[in-house]
Image: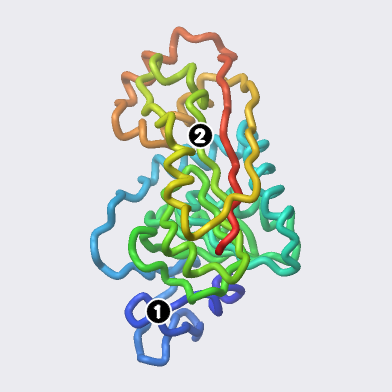
Protein backbone atom coordinates (compact mmCIF):
# COMPACT_ATOMS: atom_id res chain seq x y z
CA UNK A 1 0.00 0.00 0.00
CA UNK A 2 1.07 3.59 -0.54
CA UNK A 3 1.15 4.16 3.22
CA UNK A 4 4.03 1.66 3.46
CA UNK A 5 6.22 3.50 0.96
CA UNK A 6 5.17 7.15 1.04
CA UNK A 7 8.37 8.11 2.90
CA UNK A 8 10.34 7.03 -0.20
CA UNK A 9 8.42 9.28 -2.59
CA UNK A 10 9.10 12.87 -3.64
CA UNK A 11 6.95 15.61 -5.05
CA UNK A 12 7.41 15.71 -8.85
CA UNK A 13 6.98 19.50 -8.80
CA UNK A 14 9.54 20.55 -6.17
CA UNK A 15 11.30 17.38 -4.99
CA UNK A 16 10.15 17.68 -1.38
CA UNK A 17 9.06 14.66 0.64
CA UNK A 18 5.43 13.61 0.61
CA UNK A 19 2.96 12.67 3.31
CA UNK A 20 -0.30 10.76 3.01
CA UNK A 21 -3.37 12.56 4.34
CA UNK A 22 -6.36 10.25 3.86
CA UNK A 23 -6.58 9.96 0.06
CA UNK A 24 -4.13 12.71 -0.88
CA UNK A 25 -0.34 12.98 -1.03
CA UNK A 26 0.91 16.38 0.12
CA UNK A 27 4.28 18.13 0.24
CA UNK A 28 5.33 21.09 2.42
CA UNK A 29 5.10 23.43 -0.57
CA UNK A 30 1.40 22.71 -0.90
CA UNK A 31 1.44 20.48 -3.97
CA UNK A 32 -1.16 17.73 -3.73
CA UNK A 33 -1.85 14.49 -5.60
CA UNK A 34 -5.04 12.51 -5.27
CA UNK A 35 -4.89 8.77 -4.71
CA UNK A 36 -7.14 6.98 -7.21
CA UNK A 37 -9.87 4.75 -5.84
CA UNK A 38 -7.93 1.76 -7.22
CA UNK A 39 -5.09 2.58 -4.81
CA UNK A 40 -2.43 4.16 -7.04
CA UNK A 41 -1.24 7.75 -7.36
CA UNK A 42 -0.17 9.62 -10.48
CA UNK A 43 3.02 11.66 -10.01
CA UNK A 44 3.37 12.56 -13.68
CA UNK A 45 4.65 16.05 -14.35
CA UNK A 46 2.32 16.57 -17.32
CA UNK A 47 5.07 16.51 -19.96
CA UNK A 48 4.93 13.89 -22.68
CA UNK A 49 7.10 10.78 -22.31
CA UNK A 50 9.26 8.76 -24.69
CA UNK A 51 7.02 5.70 -24.44
CA UNK A 52 3.31 5.05 -24.62
CA UNK A 53 1.84 3.22 -21.66
CA UNK A 54 0.53 -0.30 -22.12
CA UNK A 55 -3.14 -0.55 -23.02
CA UNK A 56 -5.76 -2.36 -20.91
CA UNK A 57 -5.64 -5.32 -23.31
CA UNK A 58 -1.84 -5.55 -23.07
CA UNK A 59 -1.93 -5.45 -19.29
CA UNK A 60 -4.67 -8.08 -19.13
CA UNK A 61 -2.73 -10.36 -21.49
CA UNK A 62 0.40 -9.98 -19.36
CA UNK A 63 -1.46 -10.70 -16.14
CA UNK A 64 -3.00 -13.87 -17.59
CA UNK A 65 0.27 -15.10 -19.10
CA UNK A 66 2.36 -14.51 -15.99
CA UNK A 67 -0.29 -16.15 -13.81
CA UNK A 68 0.19 -19.31 -15.90
CA UNK A 69 3.71 -19.79 -14.51
CA UNK A 70 5.75 -19.96 -17.73
CA UNK A 71 7.99 -17.08 -16.57
CA UNK A 72 8.23 -18.21 -12.93
CA UNK A 73 11.96 -19.06 -13.28
CA UNK A 74 12.58 -15.48 -14.44
CA UNK A 75 10.77 -14.07 -11.42
CA UNK A 76 12.72 -16.41 -9.12
CA UNK A 77 16.00 -15.26 -10.68
CA UNK A 78 15.18 -11.61 -9.94
CA UNK A 79 14.18 -12.49 -6.37
CA UNK A 80 17.41 -14.45 -5.92
CA UNK A 81 19.44 -11.47 -7.13
CA UNK A 82 17.80 -9.24 -4.52
CA UNK A 83 18.28 -11.77 -1.72
CA UNK A 84 21.95 -12.19 -2.64
CA UNK A 85 22.64 -8.56 -1.72
CA UNK A 86 21.90 -9.26 1.97
CA UNK A 87 20.17 -6.00 2.81
CA UNK A 88 18.21 -6.46 6.08
CA UNK A 89 15.27 -4.18 5.16
CA UNK A 90 15.20 -3.59 1.40
CA UNK A 91 13.41 -0.58 -0.06
CA UNK A 92 12.80 -1.46 -3.69
CA UNK A 93 11.67 0.41 -6.79
CA UNK A 94 10.63 -1.52 -9.90
CA UNK A 95 10.67 0.63 -13.03
CA UNK A 96 8.15 -0.39 -15.69
CA UNK A 97 6.55 -2.75 -13.19
CA UNK A 98 3.65 -3.73 -15.44
CA UNK A 99 1.33 -6.00 -13.48
CA UNK A 100 3.58 -6.10 -10.40
CA UNK A 101 4.23 -9.85 -10.65
CA UNK A 102 8.03 -9.55 -10.42
CA UNK A 103 7.93 -7.05 -7.56
CA UNK A 104 5.45 -9.25 -5.68
CA UNK A 105 7.72 -12.29 -6.11
CA UNK A 106 10.63 -10.32 -4.61
CA UNK A 107 8.52 -9.10 -1.70
CA UNK A 108 7.34 -12.66 -1.02
CA UNK A 109 10.96 -13.85 -1.04
CA UNK A 110 12.14 -11.07 1.32
CA UNK A 111 9.57 -10.62 4.13
CA UNK A 112 11.29 -7.47 5.44
CA UNK A 113 11.16 -5.69 2.08
CA UNK A 114 8.76 -3.05 0.79
CA UNK A 115 8.47 -1.78 -2.73
CA UNK A 116 7.25 0.84 -5.17
CA UNK A 117 5.98 -0.28 -8.56
CA UNK A 118 6.30 2.52 -11.11
CA UNK A 119 4.79 2.48 -14.58
CA UNK A 120 3.73 5.06 -17.15
CA UNK A 121 0.44 3.19 -17.69
CA UNK A 122 -2.41 3.83 -15.29
CA UNK A 123 -3.82 0.44 -16.25
CA UNK A 124 -0.60 -1.15 -15.03
CA UNK A 125 -0.70 0.90 -11.83
CA UNK A 126 -4.16 -0.44 -11.04
CA UNK A 127 -2.74 -3.97 -11.12
CA UNK A 128 0.38 -3.05 -9.15
CA UNK A 129 -1.74 -1.53 -6.38
CA UNK A 130 -3.27 -4.95 -5.76
CA UNK A 131 -0.16 -7.05 -6.44
CA UNK A 132 1.16 -7.16 -2.86
CA UNK A 133 0.25 -5.62 0.52
CA UNK A 134 3.78 -4.15 0.89
CA UNK A 135 3.78 -2.55 -2.57
CA UNK A 136 2.69 0.95 -3.55
CA UNK A 137 1.75 1.89 -7.13
CA UNK A 138 2.86 5.11 -8.86
CA UNK A 139 2.27 6.44 -12.37
CA UNK A 140 5.39 8.21 -13.62
CA UNK A 141 7.79 8.32 -16.56
CA UNK A 142 11.24 6.77 -16.11
CA UNK A 143 12.71 9.27 -18.60
CA UNK A 144 11.80 12.20 -16.41
CA UNK A 145 12.95 12.96 -12.86
CA UNK A 146 11.71 10.01 -10.82
CA UNK A 147 9.32 10.98 -7.98
CA UNK A 148 11.60 9.31 -5.43
CA UNK A 149 13.80 10.93 -2.78
CA UNK A 150 17.59 10.95 -3.13
CA UNK A 151 19.44 7.90 -1.80
CA UNK A 152 16.51 6.20 -0.07
CA UNK A 153 16.44 2.89 -1.97
CA UNK A 154 18.40 -0.32 -1.57
CA UNK A 155 17.37 -1.77 -4.96
CA UNK A 156 16.08 -0.68 -8.34
CA UNK A 157 14.64 -3.39 -10.62
CA UNK A 158 14.35 -3.14 -14.41
CA UNK A 159 12.67 -6.21 -15.93
CA UNK A 160 12.16 -6.04 -19.70
CA UNK A 161 11.99 -2.29 -19.07
CA UNK A 162 13.87 0.91 -19.98
CA UNK A 163 16.76 1.96 -17.75
CA UNK A 164 17.59 5.49 -16.67
CA UNK A 165 21.06 4.97 -15.14
CA UNK A 166 21.39 8.55 -13.95
CA UNK A 167 18.11 8.50 -12.04
CA UNK A 168 18.71 4.99 -10.68
CA UNK A 169 22.05 6.20 -9.32
CA UNK A 170 20.38 9.19 -7.66
CA UNK A 171 17.64 7.29 -5.83
CA UNK A 172 19.85 4.41 -4.65
CA UNK A 173 21.71 4.69 -1.38
CA UNK A 174 25.43 4.02 -1.04
CA UNK A 175 26.15 0.49 -2.23
CA UNK A 176 22.60 0.07 -3.54
CA UNK A 177 21.93 -2.51 -6.24
CA UNK A 178 20.43 -2.17 -9.71
CA UNK A 179 19.03 -5.52 -10.92
CA UNK A 180 18.36 -5.68 -14.65
CA UNK A 181 16.73 -8.51 -16.61
CA UNK A 182 17.32 -8.35 -20.36
CA UNK A 183 16.38 -10.85 -23.08
CA UNK A 184 19.08 -12.58 -25.10
CA UNK A 185 18.82 -13.04 -28.87
CA UNK A 186 17.45 -16.56 -28.20
CA UNK A 187 14.51 -15.34 -26.15
CA UNK A 188 11.27 -16.36 -27.91
CA UNK A 189 13.33 -16.90 -31.06
CA UNK A 190 10.89 -19.50 -32.38
CA UNK A 191 8.21 -16.82 -32.60
CA UNK A 192 10.10 -13.89 -34.13
CA UNK A 193 9.76 -14.81 -37.79
CA UNK A 194 6.68 -16.96 -37.39
CA UNK A 195 4.56 -14.27 -35.76
CA UNK A 196 6.45 -11.16 -36.81
CA UNK A 197 7.48 -10.28 -33.27
CA UNK A 198 9.91 -7.48 -32.47
CA UNK A 199 13.51 -8.72 -32.57
CA UNK A 200 15.87 -8.47 -29.61
CA UNK A 201 18.91 -6.26 -30.13
CA UNK A 202 21.83 -8.71 -29.88
CA UNK A 203 24.04 -5.95 -28.43
CA UNK A 204 21.63 -5.10 -25.61
CA UNK A 205 23.82 -6.40 -22.77
CA UNK A 206 26.87 -4.65 -24.25
CA UNK A 207 24.98 -1.36 -24.46
CA UNK A 208 23.65 -1.88 -20.94
CA UNK A 209 27.20 -2.12 -19.63
CA UNK A 210 28.15 1.07 -21.42
CA UNK A 211 25.17 2.90 -19.94
CA UNK A 212 26.16 1.81 -16.42
CA UNK A 213 29.81 2.83 -16.85
CA UNK A 214 30.95 5.45 -14.37
CA UNK A 215 27.92 5.05 -12.13
CA UNK A 216 27.75 1.31 -11.39
CA UNK A 217 30.02 -1.73 -11.17
CA UNK A 218 28.63 -5.07 -12.29
CA UNK A 219 28.92 -7.58 -9.45
CA UNK A 220 26.95 -10.52 -10.81
CA UNK A 221 25.62 -11.89 -14.08
CA UNK A 222 23.40 -14.93 -14.46
CA UNK A 223 21.98 -16.48 -17.61
CA UNK A 224 18.59 -18.16 -17.35
CA UNK A 225 17.45 -20.30 -20.27
CA UNK A 226 14.89 -23.08 -20.47
CA UNK A 227 12.28 -24.56 -22.84
CA UNK A 228 8.59 -23.78 -22.50
CA UNK A 229 5.63 -25.63 -23.96
CA UNK A 230 2.96 -23.06 -24.80
CA UNK A 231 -0.67 -23.53 -25.76
CA UNK A 232 -2.40 -21.40 -28.39
CA UNK A 233 -3.88 -19.27 -25.59
CA UNK A 234 -0.43 -18.85 -24.07
CA UNK A 235 0.97 -17.69 -27.41
CA UNK A 236 -1.85 -15.21 -27.91
CA UNK A 237 -1.26 -13.72 -24.47
CA UNK A 238 2.52 -13.70 -24.86
CA UNK A 239 2.39 -11.74 -28.11
CA UNK A 240 -0.43 -9.56 -26.83
CA UNK A 241 1.44 -8.42 -23.72
CA UNK A 242 4.50 -6.97 -25.47
CA UNK A 243 5.43 -4.36 -28.07
CA UNK A 244 4.54 -6.73 -30.90
CA UNK A 245 0.90 -6.24 -29.94
CA UNK A 246 1.12 -2.76 -31.47
CA UNK A 247 2.11 -4.20 -34.87
CA UNK A 248 -0.02 -7.34 -35.22
CA UNK A 249 -3.77 -7.39 -35.75
CA UNK A 250 -5.74 -9.98 -33.75
CA UNK A 251 -6.83 -11.56 -37.03
CA UNK A 252 -3.28 -12.00 -38.31
CA UNK A 253 -2.13 -13.39 -34.97
CA UNK A 254 -5.00 -15.88 -34.79
CA UNK A 255 -4.30 -17.07 -38.34
CA UNK A 256 -0.59 -17.53 -37.62
CA UNK A 257 -1.23 -19.53 -34.45
CA UNK A 258 -4.08 -21.70 -35.73
CA UNK A 259 -1.91 -24.28 -37.53
CA UNK A 260 0.72 -24.63 -34.80
CA UNK A 261 0.89 -27.72 -32.54
CA UNK A 262 -1.25 -27.49 -29.42
CA UNK A 263 1.93 -27.57 -27.31
CA UNK A 264 4.43 -25.37 -29.13
CA UNK A 265 8.09 -25.29 -27.96
CA UNK A 266 9.43 -21.82 -27.21
CA UNK A 267 12.72 -20.81 -25.55
CA UNK A 268 12.95 -18.43 -22.62
CA UNK A 269 16.42 -16.90 -22.46
CA UNK A 270 17.47 -13.88 -20.40
CA UNK A 271 20.41 -12.38 -18.55
CA UNK A 272 20.01 -11.09 -15.00
CA UNK A 273 22.71 -8.54 -14.16
CA UNK A 274 23.37 -6.95 -10.77
CA UNK A 275 25.15 -3.60 -10.57
CA UNK A 276 26.37 -1.89 -7.41
CA UNK A 277 26.12 1.88 -7.10
CA UNK A 278 29.44 3.71 -7.03
Residue 38 in view, yes or no: no
Neighbor class of circle 2 (other Cα within 10 Å; few <14, some 14-19, many 20+) is many
Please state, as top left, top right, bottom left or bottom right, where the N terminus lies in the image.
Answer: bottom right
Residue drawn at the location 32% of the way across and 79% of the way down: 13
* Percent of width and height locating residue 24: 44, 81
Q: Secondary structure at mark 2?
A: strand
Residues under numbered marks 2 and 1 in contact, where contact means CB atoms less than 8 Å apart: no
Which quadrant would residue 240 be assigned to in this image? Answer: top left
Residue drawn at the location 55% of the way across and 54% of the way down: 157
- Mark 2–mark 1 distance (CA, rounded to whole Å): 33 Å
Q: Is residue 90 left or right of residue 239?
A: right
Marking on residue 11: 1
Q: Earlier in the sequence, mark 2 or mark 1?
A: 1
Residue drawn at the location 60% of the way across and 61% of the way down: 155
Q: Is residue 19 left or right of residue 76?
A: left
> Which of labels 2 and 1 is toward the front?
2
Query: Mark 2 = which residue?
Result: 183
Residue nearest the observer in this picture, 95 or 63 = 95
Residue 200 in view, yes or no: yes
Q: Using the image, determine if residue 33 lies above or below residue 191.
A: below
* Percent of width and height locating residue 53: 34, 50
Residue nearest the observer in this picture, 225 or 195 = 225
Please state, as top left, top right, bottom left or bottom right, where the C terminus lies in the image.
Answer: bottom right
Amino acid sequence: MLSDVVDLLACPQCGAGLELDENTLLCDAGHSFDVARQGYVSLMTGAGGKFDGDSPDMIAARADFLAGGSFDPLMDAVADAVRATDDPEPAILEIGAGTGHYLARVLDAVPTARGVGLDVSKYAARRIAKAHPRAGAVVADVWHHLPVRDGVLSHVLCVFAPRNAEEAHRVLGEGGALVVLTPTERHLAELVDLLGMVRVDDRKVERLGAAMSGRFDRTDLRDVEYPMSLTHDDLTRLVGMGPSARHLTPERLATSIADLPRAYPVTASVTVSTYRRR
